[in-house]
Image (cartoon, rainbow, N blue to C red):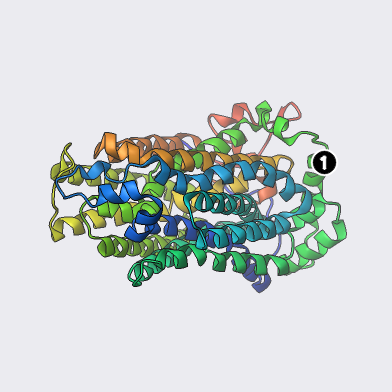
Amino acid sequence: MAGGAFTEKGKQYPGKMTVFVFLTCLVASSGGLIFGYDIGISGGVTSMDPFLKRFFPSVYAKEQEVVETNQYCKFDSVLLTLFTSSLYLAALVASLFAGYITKRCGRRVSMLGGGAIFLVGAVLNGLAQNVAMLIIGRIFLGIGVGFSNQSVPLYLSEMAPAKMRGMLNISFQLMTTVGILVANLINYFTAKIPGGWGWRIGLGLAAVPAVIMVGGSIFLPDTPNSLVARGKVESARAMLRRIRGTDDVSLEFDDLVAASEASEAIQNPWGTLLQRRYRPQLVMAVLIPTLQQLTGINVVMFYAPVLFKTIGFGGTASLMSAVITGLVNMFSTFVSIATVDRLGRRKLLLEGGIQMILAQFVLGTLIAVKFGTTGVAAISRPYAIGVVFCICVFVSAFAWSWGPLGWLVPSEIFPLEIRSAAQSVVVVFNMIFTFIIAQIFLMLLCHLKFGLFYFFGAWEIAMTLFVYFFLPETKGIPIEEMDRIWANHWYWKRFAVDGGRKVELTSTAV
């Protein structure tokens, strides 16, 4: 296989999965709830007529026009998309500062701060009186998301034993899907509230996952990696014994200390990340989150109700269709949890990529046949069911591949000396492209029409080829030993240099 694979004959640390590790990772993964809830809730409220009538009257007026109107363009509004995408711009900026705080103060403090700031944003949005108040609230939400998305994946990867790292790290994505599903259900029921104020409940209830994250972070321990990096060596040794369930932790602890000493010798981790020997990690830090967003998943998830309304579903029907996709998203994530440490990362990414390609092209064709380039049509119930089915096929593929693995793989491949800086790069590029796509999606839908689905399908072809040729397998490899995978790769081995010599490892090509 072009990507190559490590045989896992290198160091294996003693230890096992403990109840303590499981519970701490479960609590930490609640950071995914705030991210997922916002993705789900924002798309729902922007499809509610009372919300549009109050804050975006021009969009509301266009929506009320008869079906002969071009359905592709009825929601095209710069101000409406700014409401959605302002969060991701704020998260982008926040993640730059979150990397420093996560490194100096610990993963737990970063999660705590992110949850508290998200809570402020939820209150502002729930009480919003005008568009300015809405967007300011979204900015606070974005800062909270930036901090949590920077710290939570690192926390999970550092706490988990190597052989269970995939499963535990994916709990972050699972919680994201739970947040999306809960938000979709809340949208569905609050849309029916007489008086048209149900959107306030949906936006305000974002405070609940924020409180869960804040409350959980108060009681969470910090990771041994973070404790060592901050000079708390004996506390780190005690924590490592506790999370591994054994006193025989000297091998792993020595590697943590050595990695920390190498990290402390680095004065400028951002500059270090740009060095030639870290080129593979830098490329992955940029391309994996970028390609994750170019699947088009956020188009489906936070614009799902709007998208379904655009192709002819009624208001309540569009929200129910979003609930269906939310359920598919959540349950499909369990497939990844069950298989990622057995099948590996590459197989899931390759299968998921092929499935998404097929779904996007079929979906684009279905919409092209019915709406053509005019965007004028009425669709039958069976046809609508077919569209929803294709979207569910696409969502399921993403949910067991690029969704969770887009966060897992970057969080496990960085050495400690560049880990916080590199994870910040991951979040920055994730949020840059989430922001760009959120900001231009409705415009692209208006101009590219059904071709938008072919556009994303073409990107999915490119990312599947990227995985096949350039992403090595990382399953089962201790996080502090991850540098060895690059020396075994057909392309990246030219960069795998440590102190001027090639890194040796025991491996075979697959």
> For residue 468, which quarter of the picture?
top left
The residue located at (60%, 69%) in the rendering is 212
Q: What is the x, y in percent for residue 126? A: 51, 63
Residue located at (26% from left, 47% from top) = 62
Name the spot of residue 28 as percent of width and height, x first. 63, 63
Q: Give the structural element (helix, strand or loop) at label 1.
A: helix
Q: Residue 488, relative to residue 353: is it above or below?
A: above
Horizontal arrangement in the rendering, residue 403 relative to residue 314 (left or right): right
Front residue (pair 32, 276) = 32
In this figure, which residue is indicated by the disc labeled 1?
Answer: 264
| Residue 239 left/right relative to 335 | right
- The spot of residue 499 in percent (x, y) is 76, 29
Q: Is residue 249 left or right of residue 309?
A: right
Q: Give residue 412's position: percent from left, percent from top.
A: 61, 48
Q: In this view, does 489 lie above or below 420?
A: above
How packed mark 1 is, by other alpha carbons closer than 10 Å (few <14, some 14-19, many 20 or more), is some
Q: Which amino acid does label 1 sit on?
A: Glu
Closer to the camera, 153 or 141?
141
Q: In which quarter of the image is the N terminus?
A: top left
Residue 96 appears in the figure: yes
Is residue 100 found left or right of 471 in the rendered image?
right
State whether residue 167 appears in this view: no
- What residue lies at 68% left-to-right and 36% top-to-bottom? 504
Q: How many numbered marks appear?
A: 1
